[in-house]
Image (spheres, coloured by chain):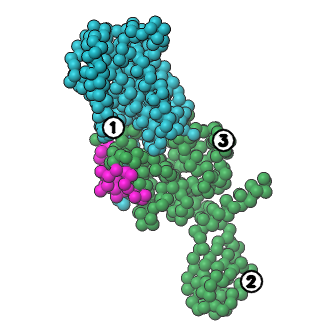
Amino acid sequence: MKALSIRGLTKTYRNGVQALRGIDLDVEEGDFFALLGPNGAGKTTAIGVIMSLVTKSGGAISVFGHDIDRSLDRAKSCIGLVPQEINFNQFEKVFTIIVNQAGFYGIPRKLALERSERYLRQLQLWEKRDSIARSLSGGMKRRLMIARALVHEPRLLILDEPTAGVDIEIRRSMWTFLRAINEQGTTIILTTHYLEEAESLCRNIAIIDGGRIIENDTMAGVIRKLNQETFVLNVRAAMVSMPVLDGYVARMTDDHTIEIEVSKEQSLNDIFARLTQQRIEVVSMRNKVNRLEELFMRLVESKGAAGARAG
Amino acid sequence: MEQAAASVNPADQSLARIRRIGLQTIVRREYGRIIRIWGQTLVPPAVTATLYFIIFGSLIGRRIGQMGGYDYMQYIAPGLIMMAVISNSYGNVVSSFFGAKFGKHIEELLVAPLPNWLIVLGYVSGGVMRGLLVGAVVTGVALFFTRIPVEHPLLIVGSVLLTSVVFSLGGFFNAIFAKNFDQISWFPTFILTPLIYLGGVFYSVSLLPAWAERLSYINPILYMVNTFRHGFLGTSDVNLAFAFLIMAAFAITMFTVVVLLMNRGTGIRE
């Protein structure tokens, strides 16, 4: 079953800005789906329309088969949202915020109290339950919004940049938590600017730019489309000049480091063979940037260049 | 972080049940807000009412003598109670709903499976609750200064409830259109307060010149105050059936307009 199905979704704001220009998207039940795009690409608008926070201009959306034009409340009962911006009452107590949200989704009070405790414990906020929300740190506020989105145990969880501004330790523990939620059957849609996060967590991906989907595939499929990667090689002995690597775009960034661009048609074995011939020993190698990030940049740049040509 | 426990899916619940619990939650939250900020919600009306009773009741009222067959203090007591009910019903909804818009936590309700009419009903219930609580506080203050008879209790209950609903809806209407805090104080200052003061709280309109008396009858607050006063004292400047018709018409029309505005997304959706 499709957790989310979008057809021909458009949104034009009153000021004339076309935020969405006909989006088609399907997310299968149980998926961990990445929705990526540069700032202003239309991700948050799309999520706003799904959640009925933004009025669509055209198109159709259904959530687990519930059309939002015909069965909006039923569709909304299936979704939990972690928005990009803080949107809880900063003067309320942490525990009250979660219990109230459960009530808004029709969870009986006794169960709401139990679940609020459970999710606050799972997100390491139980000790802060009686604190006023505004006193929480940035990372705690993000976790509070995750707990709030989960308290009605939605079938579809939408996270709009949930780890923005969160330190790496908390971010990784949030990844573990989200993986566990997904393994238990919750469909997750994630937008993030940390592409390593998307690559690590998500099985399928859509890239949105200029209000259009420019890529939609499995994560592995998208990564395979990366024609060229840039590697950074660290060598044992200091080099006095750039080794000869004809046919490759390479440069020496310091006396122990080479940056080299390798296309799909070329071979890393060939590079190592040539360096070995020149008595250069490679001690470590890494991608210059995350592979998904590299692909993302190439896609968005080529789209931008095409747009500039068209313009 | 620990792993999540097995899920119980609320999407399988009936919408009627979700709505009932949702409404209870909004009402409980609004009640919690009124009590949490009691220094802003319950105390100021008691202080204001005390000052009115001291100045207009004891000091000036003694020189005025009787009005409508009652001591002046007795005559103004229902009007002062109603004045507090009106301004607090209005103030509660306008500040709570605009605060939710301003702080963006209105989105907690907008993403939930609750229809707009129920959200309006929840906020209006909060406004009525505060109106009645403050009304009870001011009644307590009035009883400290004077004895107030109760001639028609049902009339009292009916008029105070309808008035409170009308002005709670007024507060909601104001909050929908308000874009900043100035705009939530504009209507109470320039429209509501003059209408209250000219609505027969402190005098019988029969004392006015004929043209002013006729003009007073276009003020809806006159009907509310007088119906309420009739419930206590058995004296009124207006036709009671017509007064209830006006109050009910206002309540129904304003509820419809506010829900339509919410459905259109005015002031809350882009």
In the displayed structure, does residue B135 sit left or right of residue A142? left
Q: Are marks 1 and 3 in contact (CB under 8 Å)?
A: no
Q: Main secondary structure of the magenta part?
A: helix
Q: Residue furthest front?
A: B63
**Mark 2, residue position:** A246
**Quadrant the N terminus of chain B occupies:** bottom left
Q: Is residue B16 shown in magenta?
A: no
Q: Position of residue B227 (x, y in %)?
A: 35, 13
Question: In this picture, which residue range is highlighted in magenta?
Answer: A111-140
Position of B53 with respect to B188 (left or right) is left
Residue wearing tag 3: A15
Q: Nearer the viewer, residue A155 or A254?
A: A254
Amino acid marked by disc 3: Asn
Q: Is the residue B191 above or below the residue B66 in the image? A: below
Which quadrant is home to the C terminus of chain B? top right
The chain letter corresponding to green is A
Estimate the spatial distance between the alpha carbons at disc 1 and disc 2, rounded to whole Å.
Answer: 78 Å
Q: Residue at x 58, y 68 (%)?
A: A290
Q: Please state if A140 lies on the left or on the right of A41 as rendered.
A: left
Q: Which residue is mark 1?
A: B40
Circle 1: residue type: Gln
Colour used to depict chain B in the structure image:
cyan
Q: Residue at x 48, y 22 (%)?
A: B254
Q: Can I make out residue B117 in this image? A: no
